[in-house]
C-alpha cells in the first residue's frame, strides 16, 4: 500500500490517491488505486477506486481530474457519494495529469513515445508531445511550462509545446513558475533557475536527488532524498523537515501540501505539520470491497 499524490489547498481541502497491490499473487495487474477526499472535519473519505488510476490534479475551480491509464475521469463534485463523474477514452495511455485551469488541462503517458491530450473545457484533443513530460506548471496561458527527460524544458505557445534549449542532459523532475522573471526546476544534477529569457544551473545537488520544487510563503521549497524538505537560502538548500521526502508539492493554497509514498502532509506556517499516513489509508481501504482481483 502506498500514497501516490495529492492536490488541493490544504489537508482539509484536498484530494489524494492511495494504492494497494499484491506482489505475491499470480494475477496480472493486481493493483488498485483509491481517490480520497480530505474534508473540513480533518478526516479523509473514500471517493472512487479503479485499477487504472495513476495520477490526479485538482483545478482552481475544485474540479478533479484523474488519469486512469486508458481513460480520463473528472468530476465537479469529487466527494464521498458526490457522483457526477465524466469519462473519456483517450486512445492512448495516460499516467499523469496537470494544467492551469479547466480550459487548459494536459494528460500524458509520462514515457517514451507517449501521447499527450489537451482538455479545452469540452473536448480532449490529442497533440504532439515535446518528449517525456514529467511535470507541468504555470501562472497563465502564455506562461505555462513543462519539463521532463533528456533535459526537456518547453513552453506552451497556445497551440503546441515549443522546446527551449538547455544544456542539461538528464531529467528535470519538477518545475515551478512564479513569474516571467522567476522560475525553478529540479534536475538530476541540481536546482536550475530560469525566466522567459533562458535557464541556467543555480546550485549542484551534492548529495541525493532533488524531487520537487514550489514557492510558498515567499520561500522556495525543494523536496530531496537525503535532507528531506528544504528551503533555498542563498546558494544552499537548508533542511527544514528532515523526515519528509516529497515527490509532489502543491503550493496554491494557504497550506503547502507535500506528497510522498508513505504520507500526505501539510503545513500552514512552515513549522507545524499534519499528516495522513498509510495507517490512516489502511483504515479507509478496510471499508472498501475486497480487492478486485479477489472478487
Image (spheres, rainbow, N blue to C red):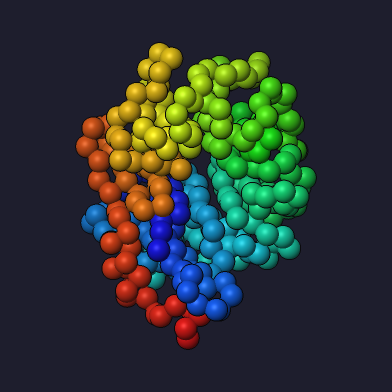
The answer, for residue 208, to whether it is visible in the render is yes
Q: Extreme bottom residue here?
A: 295
Question: Quadrant location of residue 37?
Answer: bottom left
Q: Position of residue 236 (x, y in %)?
A: 40, 18
Question: Quadrant location of residue 253?
Answer: top left
Residue 27 vs 131, above or below: the answer is: below
Q: Camera-side residue: 209 or 120?
A: 209
Residue 281 vs 293, above or below: the answer is: above
Using residue 43 as the reference point, say whether residue 117 is left or right of it: right
Residue 186 vs 111, above or below: the answer is: above
Using residue 121 as the reference point, say whether residue 11 is left or right of it: left
Quadrant of image for the N terminus: bottom left
Q: Position of residue 157 (x, y in %)?
A: 72, 32
Q: Extreme top residue here?
A: 234
- What residue is shown at x 57% (from left), y 19% (from top)? 201
Q: Camera-side residue: 249 or 191?
A: 191
The answer, for residue 103, to whether it is visible in the render is no
Q: Position of residue 117 (x, y in %)?
A: 69, 51
Amino acid at each position: 500500500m502506498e500514497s501516490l499524490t495529492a492536490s488541493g489547498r490544504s489537508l482539509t481541502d484536498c484530494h489524494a490517491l492511495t494504492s494497494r497491490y499484491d506482489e505475491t499473487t499470480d494475477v496480472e495487474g493486481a493493483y488498485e488505486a483509491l481517490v480520497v477526499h480530505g474534508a473540513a472535519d480533518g478526516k479523509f473519505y473514500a471517493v472512487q477506486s479503479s485499477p487504472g488510476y495513476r495520477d490526479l490534479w485538482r483545478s482552481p475551480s475544485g474540479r478533479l481530474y484523474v488519469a486512469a491509464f486508458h481513460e480520463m475521469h473528472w468530476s465537479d463534485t469529487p466527494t464521498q457519494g458526490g457522483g457526477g463523474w465524466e469519462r473519456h477514452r483517450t486512445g492512448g495511455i495516460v499516467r499523469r495529469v496537470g494544467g492551469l485551469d479547466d480550459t487548459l488541462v494536459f494528460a500524458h503517458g509520462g514515457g517514451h513515445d507517449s501521447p499527450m491530450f489537451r482538455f479545452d473545457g469540452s473536448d480532449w484533443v490529442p497533440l504532439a508531445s515535446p518528449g517525456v513530460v514529467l511535470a507541468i506548471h504555470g501562472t497563465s496561458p502564455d506562461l505555462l511550462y513543462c519539463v521532463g527527460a533528456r533535459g526537456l524544458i518547453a513552453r506552451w505557445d497556445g497551440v503546441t509545446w515549443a522546446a527551449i534549449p538547455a544544456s542539461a542532459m538528464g531529467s528535470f523532475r519538477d518545475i515551478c513558475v512564479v513569474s516571467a522573471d522567476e522560475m525553478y526546476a529540479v534536475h538530476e544534477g541540481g536546482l536550475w533557475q530560469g525566466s522567459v529569457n533562458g535557464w541556467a544551473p543555480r546550485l549542484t545537488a551534492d548529495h541525493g536527488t532533488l524531487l520537487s520544487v514550489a514557492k510558498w510563503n515567499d520561500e522556495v521549497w525543494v523536496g530531496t532524498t537525503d535532507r528531506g524538505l528544504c528551503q533555498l537560502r542563498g546558494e544552499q538548500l537548508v533542511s527544514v523537515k528532515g523526515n519528509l521526502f516529497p515527490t509532489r508539492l502543491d503550493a496554491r493554497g494557504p497550506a503547502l501540501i507535500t506528497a510522498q509514498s508513505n504520507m500526505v502532509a501539510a503545513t500552514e506556517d512552515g513549522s507545524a505539520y499534519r499528516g495522513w499516513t498509510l495507517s490512516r489509508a489502511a483504515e479507509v481501504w478496510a471499508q472498501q470491497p475486497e480487492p478486485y482481483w479477489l472478487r
